[in-house]
Image: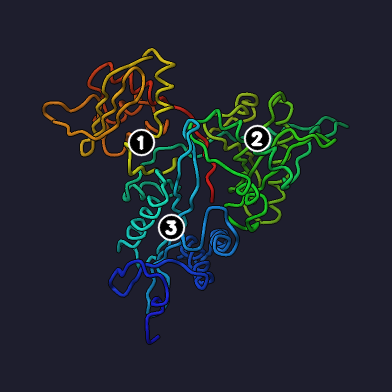
Amino acid sequence: MSESKSKKYDVLRDLGDGLVLRRVTEEDTEALVAFNARVHGNIEKEELEERVGVWTRDLMEKPHPTFDIGDFTLVEEPQTGKIVSSLCLISQTWSYGGIPFGVGRPEIVGTDPEYRNRGLVRAQFEVIHQWSAERGQMVQAITGIPYYYRSFGYEMGLALGGGKLGYLPHVPVLKKDEEEPYVIRPAADTDILFISELYESATLRYLVNCERDEALWHYEIDGKDEKNVNRSVLMVIETPDGERVGYLAHPDYNWGPTLAVYQYEVKPGLSWTAVTPSVIRYMKATGEAYYERDKGKELGAFGFWLGTEHPVYDIISGKLPRSREPYAFFVRVADLAGFIRLLAPVLEERLADSQLVGHSGELKITFFRDELKLVFKDGNLVEVEGWKPEPLGQPGDAAFPDLVFLQLLFGYRSFEELNYAFADCYPENDEATVLLNVLFPKQASNVWPVA
C-alpha cells in the first residue's frame, strides 16, 4: 500500500512505531468483527469467540439507544490497515440511592498478542476518558480480568453478580396429573411497561442500579442477534389464562453445565414460593435444550445470579445449596468531590435517620496522595473540597490507601471490613468511625449494565 489508509479517517493520535489511534468507521466492520472474535478467543488453539464477534457486529450495524460506531477506537498499522488493538465506550445512566448519574462503560478491550505491553490500551483509555468527561459522565465502570484495569485508575469497588445454585435433584417435580401453574413465554414490546414497572420497583432494594428507558427495553427484546454474548432472553411469567405475574432474563446459552437467570421479579402481592418452582422447571427444560443445540457440557445445575441479596434465596434456600461469591466491577471516579456533591441528598438522608441527626463538623479523609474534606452544618453537606494533609501533624480523621475508598463509597465493603483488611485504612477518632459508618453503609447492588 503506497499511502496511509488512515489518512481518510479521523486520526486521534499518532502513536509512533508505524501505528495510529483513530475512530472506527463503517468500513472497518468486517475487520473489527474478525479481530475481536480472534483476540477474545483462544489464539493458541485458533478458536474464535464467535459471540464477542457478533456483539461487535451488532454495535457496528444495528441501532443502539446509547452507542454509535464512532464510540469504537482502534489502533492500526496505516500501511497495511491491520487492526492491532481496539475498545469501545458504551454510555448509560446509573443511579445511586435514586440519584441518576452518567456512566461510561469501556468494553471489548483487546490487543493482538504481538503488540501487547506497548501502551496501546492506555492510549485508548486516555481518549475514552476524555470522551466520557465531555459527556458529563462522572463514573466509568468495566467488567474484566483481575487487576488489569487498576493500571488505568480503576478500583474493584462495586459488587458484580454472585448468587445461589442448585442441582438437578433439587428441581421440584410436578405431581401426577398436576398442570404447570405458570407459563413462561418470550417478552414482547407490549410487555415493556409491565416489565419496566417491576424492574423499577425492584431497584429500591439496591444502592446502585442501571436505569432503563423504553428504548433500552426494546433493544433488550429484539435489538441483538441471538448469538450476541450479551443478548438477554427476556421472558414473561403468566398464569394459564394470560395474567402477567413476573419476568426473568437469562443468557441464550449455558455457562458450562449451568443455566442461570440474572433477572427475576414477581409482582407485589404474589407469593415467590408459588411462582419459583415453575421458574426452576423452565430453567431445567431450557438448559437441556441449549445443551442439545450447542453440544457443550451436559446440564447439571440451575443458578440464580441475582447478587448477594434477593427474595428468592430465602424462600428456597434448601434447593440452592451452593453459593457463588460476587465478582466486582472496576469503577473510576475522576472527580470524587464532584460525585460526592451530587450524592449529598443521600448522605444527608442517612444522617437524618441516624444517631448523628443534625450533625455539624468536618470529616477530613486522606488518600495519602489525594485528600478530601466534607463539611456538615445542621445535618447538611455544605462543602466538599480537597485539603492538604500534614502526615506528621494532622493526617486527617480517616485514611484510605490508593482507591480503596471507592469500595466504601459504592457499598461494596463496610468501613470495618476495610479497616480489618488494610493496615493503612484506619480512623483517627471514634467520631470519624461513626460518621463513616452512617454516611457509607455496606449495601447490596445488582447492576445490569447496558451492553
Say few, some or many: other residues with alpha carbon within 10 Å of mark 3 (under 14 / 14 to 19 / 20 or more).
Answer: many
Residue furthest right as drawn: 177
Q: Residue at x 30, y 31 (%)?
A: 384
What is the CA distance from the residue labelled 2 to the residue labelled 1? 30 Å
Q: Amino acid at mark 1?
A: Leu
What is the CA distance from the residue labelled 3 to the residue labelled 2? 34 Å
Q: Choose between 42 and 391: the one closer to the eye.
A: 391
* In this rendering, the label closer to the viewer, 2 or 1: 2
Q: Amino acid at mark 2?
A: Glu
- Counting residues from the start of the chain, the first of labels 3 and 2 encountered is 3
* In this rendering, the label closer to the viewer, 3 or 1: 1
From the top left corner, tell me how far across and down residue 50 is, in percent.
57, 62
Is 252 rendered above or below residue 52? above
The residue carrying mark 1 is 406
User: Is residue 227 found left or right of 154 in the rendered image?
Assistant: right
Q: Choose between 13 and 253: the one closer to the eye.
A: 13
Q: Secondary structure at mark 2?
A: helix
The residue carrying mark 2 is 197
The residue carrying mark 3 is 109
Is 87 rendered above or below residue 2? above
Q: Residue at x 32, y 60 (%)?
A: 123
Q: Which mark identifies residue 177?
A: none
User: Do the residues bearing badges 3 and 1 touch, measured as CB atoms within 8 Å?
Assistant: no
